[in-house]
Structure formats: C-alpha cells, structure tokens
Image (cartoon, rainbow, N blue to C red):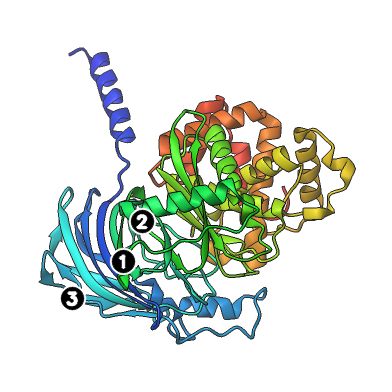
C-alpha cells in the first residue's frame, strides 16, 4: 500500500473508532410488587439482567435504594432540605420512609454488600460481584425488598387514598465513561439513570385506579379505562363515569411493559376520573393518552386530555416524534414547592393554585420531559439545564403560541402585550426576564451546588430558556429547530453530555457555537 493510502486508511480507521467509542450499559428488569394500602407499604421482588457494555471489567455495582433517604434527619436529602434557605425550617419528615428486606443474589448465589463510605448516603449500597464482570458479559441480580412509603412531600409517598410509587425499587447507578454516579436522593437535583426494558406486575386492591410507566397489558383493565375514559372525554361537563372493578376479587394484578426508559413509576388512587383519547402525531403515528384526576365538583381538569394532546403534538413537531405508545398525566396532592414531577410516559401534577391556562402550561412542561429526561437521558444532577432549561424554552414557546401567555407572569401580562404576534410577544417576555430577574449562578453547575432551591429553579429553568432564546435571536428559529431535531435524532435513548449537544447543534446550523456554549459557564447575567 502506498504511504499516502496508508495514512488515509489510518485516518478513516481513527474516525470510525471515535464514532463507535460511545457505550452505555444495558438492563432488563422483571419486578413483582404488591401495595398494602393499610400499612402504606410495597412488598416486591426484582430480577435484573445487567449487561456490561463498557470496556472495563466490573467487580461491583452501586445500587440506589432511595426510599432510605426518608429514614432519618441526617440523610443527604434531609440535610439538604434543612440547609435550604428557601424552605421552611419547620419541615420535618424523617423516620417515616425506608427500604429493607434486601437480600441480593448474583446468578442465584448470595452476594455481599457494603454501605457507602459517606454516612449520609444510606440510600446507596455496593453489591459485590462474586467474579469479575468482563466487557460484553451479563449477570443476573435479584433481591426481595419492602418499601415503607412516607407521607408525600418529596416526589414519593402517600396522601389520603393516593399512592405515589416513585424511586421505589433497588436500581443500579449509572456507570459511564466518567465512572460511577452513585449519588444519593435529593430534593433539589433530579436523576441520571440507565436505560432499561421493564416487565412489571403490580398487585393492588381491586378498587384502585393505577397509572404507570409503560403499556398496560392486562386487557380487561385497559378496556375499562378506555371505555370510561371515552365517556368522560365526550361528556366533560356532566357527572363523570367512574371506574368500577370488573372482578369481585379483593385484589387485582396488572402487568406493564416499558422499553427504552430510564425509570418506572406508578400511581394508585380511588374515586378517580379517567379521560382517554387517541392522539395522532404529525407523522401519522397514533398513541394513547390518559388523564387521571380527582373526582370533585370544581375541577380544572375537564380539558386535561386536550392539554395532553396539544403538548405531545407540538413537541413532536418541534423536536421529534414521541416514541412511546402511551402518555399519561395524574393529578396528585397539592404541593406548592413543585408544579409536578415527571417520569417516562407518566407525570404527576401537584399545582394547587393553577388556572386553566397555567394547568395547561405545567402539564405541557411535565410531558415535555418525555423528550428532555426520558428520550434524551442527560445527567440531570450534573447538568440540570439540559433537561429543565431546554424544556422550559419549549414550554414558553407553547404558551406564547396558544395563549400569548407565560407561566412565570400569569395574569400580570398587560392586554396590549397579549395582542402581539407570537415572536414579538416572546421578545417582550424574554426582555423582561433578561433585564429584571436575578440569576447569579452559572447554568452548568451541579444541582446540589446551587445556594438555594430558588436559585436552582431560576437558573436551571429560566436562565437556560433565555440562553436558548438569545441563540435563536442570533441564528433564527428555523436553525434552532434544525439543531434540536439533529440533537434528538443523534442522542435519543442515550446519555448526551453538553459537548455532544454543542456538536449536534453545530452540525445542523453549520456554525461554530462556542460563543454561546461558553455562556453556560458564565456567572451573572448574559
């Protein structure tokens, strides 16, 4: 081979190696769980097939056992809440949530475990592998577990007749090119999870309505939800049709399947109104949409199924097709510190002071996390702006197009501003944000490093939306749309880092965007 041909071959080989160097672990869960509504507990058993796609040999696997974050006043969760200047100092929730009964086995052989060396991290445990797990090999991990759910205050728990099973099962931490991410559960700071396929069976008292990540495979239950849901969607202002059990058995077992998701959550409640409709995406794909809300006379949720449909269609148009078979929204307990919490294919809405317009906005935001969290699985703890901020940018665009409204400003937007065209309206909104809102921290800092939850929210959500708008103003909305679609298509069902996002954007717009991405590290105003 001639020298220059050899050099060319080596260069091509180098490019190929660079492009194929990305990897992520592969997991399959099988979980059986039963709700004891009197004891407020979940008894479960899980089996995980864990495939090591990394180039490293593993001698252990870190697990999140997040219900232990609620166990006492000295956990990382409780310590963060106590030290947050934006939170009430009277809050105390310790000693009321836990996970125990763990007995890990590796390929059916008992496994040793070790606690995390940080005493605050009682919700993290190391499972020792009896033999090294080499690249390309798989191992089967199993354990029973029992979760005592806390009264609801930070994503998971119970409130009245409602149960929120979130962060509820033992879950391997992410292992990626940067190593292990075995961080504890926090209130200010969300998650980073391995993609997985789930097969889950849930046993609950027969009169409960259940919404969960994934497709409901239990045909009788699904048909009842759809039949009742269609009636309520068609006759919204009339007395709603309610769920009645199709069996006289005390309990029922429901089967769910979910693929390519970073988490599995489920919600159960009695006396729930169901709405149902099919949703046709711009591509022609049809998915199922459900909303589940409290049965009360003065409810804002009569049009919730419309909000779901509009949000999924718009995000699919702007970013890329919604890739899951179902989308669901659940009305949860009132929580003034959070409008809601998102999980794949299902989200909990907890906004007690909503208007119809702001309810639409918060539902849209939480559904939007199916793109920025679920399908684009960034590290929310390290780079919160990559999910919350990008999502807020599209939420603001949705609200501006539909209402000439904005969730931040609510009813305080003057009528003459609401009469402006969408682009002019957004220009005014972002100008007010740019000139008046204090946003001192840089966007790209770990969630737990923000001085307060107020600053965390202002910067991770609002400052990032402003940053995206400034880039849009410079490049044009058409280029921004091309950029986000390229980013989505290249990184869906993967774990993109900030540099990956920048590269995808630059490929689409044909420009060096260093001057914008360097701003993610900038303190103070842009």
Secondary structure of the residue carrying numbered label 2: helix
Which numbered dot is residue 252? Answer: 1
Give the quadrant of residue 75: bottom left
Image coordinates for residue 412, horizontal then vertical, percent: 84, 54
Image coordinates for residue 310, horizontal then vertical, percent: 59, 40
| Residue 344 seen in render | no
Question: In the visual, does 24 lie left or right of 88?
Answer: left
Image coordinates for residue 437, horizontal then vertical, percent: 77, 56
Packing grade of label 1 (10 A; few <14, some 14-19, many >=20) is some
Q: Which of 381 and 269 is in front in this view?
A: 269
- Name the front one of labels 3 and 2: 2
Secondary structure of the residue carrying numbered label 1: strand
Contact (Cβ within 8 Å) of mark 3 with mark 2:
no
Which numbered dot is residue 66? Answer: none
Secondary structure of the residue carrying numbered label 3: loop
Question: In the visual, does 356 lie left or right of 347?
Answer: right
Which residue in the protein does label 2 denote?
221
Q: Residue at x 65, y 50 (%)?
A: 360
Which numbered dot is residue 112? Answer: 3
Q: Distance between the residues labelled 3 and 2?
A: 40 Å
Contact (Cβ within 8 Å) of mark 3 with mark 1:
no
Is 280 above or below relative to 392?
A: above
């Amino acid at each position: 081979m001639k020298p220059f041909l050899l050099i060319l071959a080596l260069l091509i080989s180098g490019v190929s190696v660079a492009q194929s160097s990305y990897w992520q672990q592969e997991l399959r869960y099988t979980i059986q769980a039963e709700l004891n509504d009197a004891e407020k507990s979940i008894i479960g058993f899980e089996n995980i097939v864990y495939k090591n796609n990394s180039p490293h040999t593993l001698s252990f696997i870190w697990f999140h056992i997040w219900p232990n974050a609620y166990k006492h006043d000295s956990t990382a969760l409780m310590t963060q809440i106590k030290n947050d200047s934006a939170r009430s100092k009277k809050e105390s929730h310790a000693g009321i949530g836990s996970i125990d009964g763990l007995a890990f086995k590796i390929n059916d052989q008992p496994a040793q475990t070790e606690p995390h060396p940080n005493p605050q991290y009682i919700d993290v445990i190391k499972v020792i592998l009896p033999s090294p797990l080499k690249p390309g090999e798989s191992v089967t991990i199993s354990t029973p577990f029992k979760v005592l759910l806390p009264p609801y205050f930070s994503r998971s728990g119970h409130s009245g007749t409602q149960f929120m099973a979130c962060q509820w099962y033992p879950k391997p931490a992410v292992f990626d090119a940067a190593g292990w991410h075995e961080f504890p559960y926090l209130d200010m700071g969300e998650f980073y999870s391995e993609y997985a396929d789930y097969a889950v069976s849930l046993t609950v008292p027969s009169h409960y309505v259940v919404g969960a990540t994934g497709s409901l495979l239990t045909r009788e239950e699904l048909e009842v939800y759809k039949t009742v849901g269609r009636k309520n969607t068609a006759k919204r202002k009339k007395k709603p049709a309610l769920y009645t059990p199709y069996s006289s058995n005390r309990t029922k077992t429901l089967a769910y399947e979910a693929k390519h998701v970073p988490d599995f959550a489920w919600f159960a409640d009695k006396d729930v109104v169901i709405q149902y409709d099919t949703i046709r995406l711009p591509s022609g794909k049809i998915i199922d949409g459900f909303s589940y809300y409290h049965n009360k006379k003065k409810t804002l949720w009569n049009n919730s199924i419309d909000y779901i449909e509009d949000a999924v269609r718009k995000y699919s148009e702007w970013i890329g097709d919604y890739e899951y078979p179902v989308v669901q929204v659940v009305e949860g307990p009132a929580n003034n510190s959070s409008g809601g919490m998102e999980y794949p294919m299902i989200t909990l809405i907890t906004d007690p002071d909503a208007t119809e317009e702001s309810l639409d906005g918060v539902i849209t935001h939480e559904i939007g996390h199916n793109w920025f969290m679920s399908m684009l699985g960034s590290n929310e703890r390290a780079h919160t702006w990559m999910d919350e901020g990008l999502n807020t940018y599209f939420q603001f665009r949705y609200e501006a197009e539909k209402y000439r409204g904005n969730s931040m400003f609510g009813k305080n937007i003057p009528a003459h501003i609401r009469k402006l065209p969408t682009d002019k309206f957004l220009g005014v909104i972002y100008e007010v944000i740019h000139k008046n809102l204090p946003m001192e921290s840089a966007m790209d800092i770990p969630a737990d490093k923000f001085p307060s939850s107020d600053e965390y929210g202002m910067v991770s959500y609002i400052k990032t939306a402003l940053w995206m708008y400034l880039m849009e103003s410079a490049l044009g909305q058409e280029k921004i749309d091309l950029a986000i679609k390229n980013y989505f298509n290249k990184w869906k069902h993967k774990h993109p880092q900030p540099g990956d996002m920048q590269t995808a954007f630059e490929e689409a717009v044909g420009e060096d965007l260093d001057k914008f991405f360097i701003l993610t590290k900038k303190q103070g105003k842009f």
